[in-house]
Amino acid sequence: MNKFVKIICVLVTLSMIMMVGGCSKSKVSKDNDSDTANTVKDNGNDKQKDEVTKLKLVTISTDETRVNIMENYIKPNSEKELPNFKIEFEPGGGGEDLANKMKTYNAAGDLPDVWYSEASYAPPIIEVGNQLDLTPYITKDGFIDKYSVKDALKFKDGKIYALSSGSDTFFTPRIFYNKKIFQENGIEIPETFDELIEVCKTLRSKDIVPVTTMGKGGWAPQLYLFQTMVQIEDPEVMKQLLSNEIDFTNPVIKNGLARIEELAKVGAFPKGIATLDYGPAKEMFVSGKAAMYWMFTWELPSLSEDPNVDFFPWPSDGSKYDRNNVVQYWGSPLGGYAVSATSENIEEAVKLAEFCAMQDAKYFNSQNAPVTLDTGNEITGVSELMSRNLDHFNNAETKIASFMTNAMDAKTSAEFASYGAMLLTGDYSAEQFVKDFNKIWLENTWFDK
């Protein structure tokens, strides 16, 4: 019996030793795995190298440029640069289709992780807190420092809700002119608004259309003409209107509207300007039927092919405006890649939005188009006209956002365009414009009251 007990004791002892040894081995193995595991730091979170993050991306799929970027840049490069991301690509359509899709997603509370945002449908998503404020994320990882014009990213509340390439930022309205027509008629480049009026009178007296631009739907006043006519007197007033500090009863605002009225009355624009569409307006200039073409610089690539085409800065109408130091820039801070505030992988989604914005920028660089997002790539093959345009834009210390895309909701913008079209005819006064539109401006929902 004693012998049997001794055997049992020995077996129990051996079993305990084995258990301890096994536990010890298991703990060492776990510690070693922890020390040697390959991890990746992704915006502050440790993730196993082979762990996959699933994200959904919705983009514009009807625009030729956007489709090109998606198929030839974002999709193939994401496999190389974001190997731990499994991205579900959903074509979003474009225009109203995309807007309706995002409105539906927002209403259902089931937004994709990342989507292409636009000003037409972003505000309601932001208002309910579903579109992420990217500011702290892109500040922390330094992505914001890659932008040369940071203010173009900021919404009215000072926050950043979308990331773009910044290609739109470089678009600014210019006075393109036909050098041959100016030379043959002994016309000097006007430096003041009064001189511009005299140039228009001279050209009209010779049966030459002074200025062509798209007037249909009030496009020109809505997108650049009103803003330009205010800025050439006092750029600071335009900034105040953009931030909703003043209304249309301000004297400088009234003066800007009156300048458009005066241009119309001296015959600066072609007959039927209020119904003149984009294509015919440009054709009037390139065919030599109009001396000047007032348009954004997205027309530079085609216009620069004509040796007779040049541009000059907007003439001044006051000492507070430096024609070489003030430019308007296009675009909306809500246009670009947005991130859902309810995403289960917010930091990874931010990284995807940054990646997409960079791919956009690389595409535009490949087309010799400038962007404010630094890709590290140089643009080559730029025309002399484009080069001078960029120099003027980059050297301007005062860059002012576009009024239409940064200060008016859809309803207010549509009303502004309607009244702007009437102003182009010369039969509708600046005074009446203020009387009719100011009450609409005061009801503008773009700003919190």
Image (cartoon, rainbow, N blue to C red):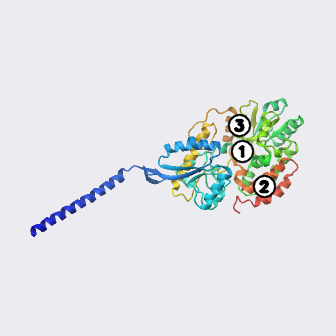
Q: Point out the frontmost of discs 1 and 2.
A: 2
- Check disc 2 and report the residue beneath it: 415
Q: Nearer the viewer, residue 11 or 367?
A: 11
- Check disc 3 and report the residue beneath it: 300
305 up-or-down from 57: above or below: above
Q: Which amino acid does label 2 sit on?
A: Glu
Query: How far apart are the two marked residues, 3 and 2, measured between alpha carbons?
Result: 30 Å
Other residues around mark 3 within 10 Å, as few (<14) / some (14–19) / many (≥20):
some
Other residues around mark 2 within 10 Å, as few (<14) / some (14–19) / many (≥20):
some
Indicate left or right for 267 with 356 as reference. Answer: right
Q: What residue type is labelled 3?
A: Leu
Q: Earlier in the sequence, mark 1 or mark 2?
A: 1
Residue at the image point whose x is 81% and y is 38% from the top = 190
Q: What residue type is labelled 1?
A: Val
State the SS at label 1: strand
Q: Dots 1 and 3: beta carbons under 8 Å?
A: no
Indicate left or right for 350 with 367 as reference. Answer: left
258 up-or-down from 203: above or below: below
Other residues around mark 1 within 10 Å, as few (<14) / some (14–19) / many (≥20):
many
* One can see residue 434 in this view: yes
Q: Which of marks 1 and 3 is nearer the N terminus?
A: 3
Q: Dots 1 and 2: beta carbons under 8 Å?
A: no
Residue at the image point whose x is 88% and y is 45% from the top = 265
Query: How far apart are the two marked residues, 1 and 3, measured between alpha carbons?
Result: 19 Å
Q: Nearer the viewer, residue 17 or 245?
A: 17
Picture quadrant where residue 75 is located: top right
Q: Nearer the viewer, residue 53 or 191?
A: 53
- Check disc 1 and report the residue beneath it: 326
State the SS at label 2: helix
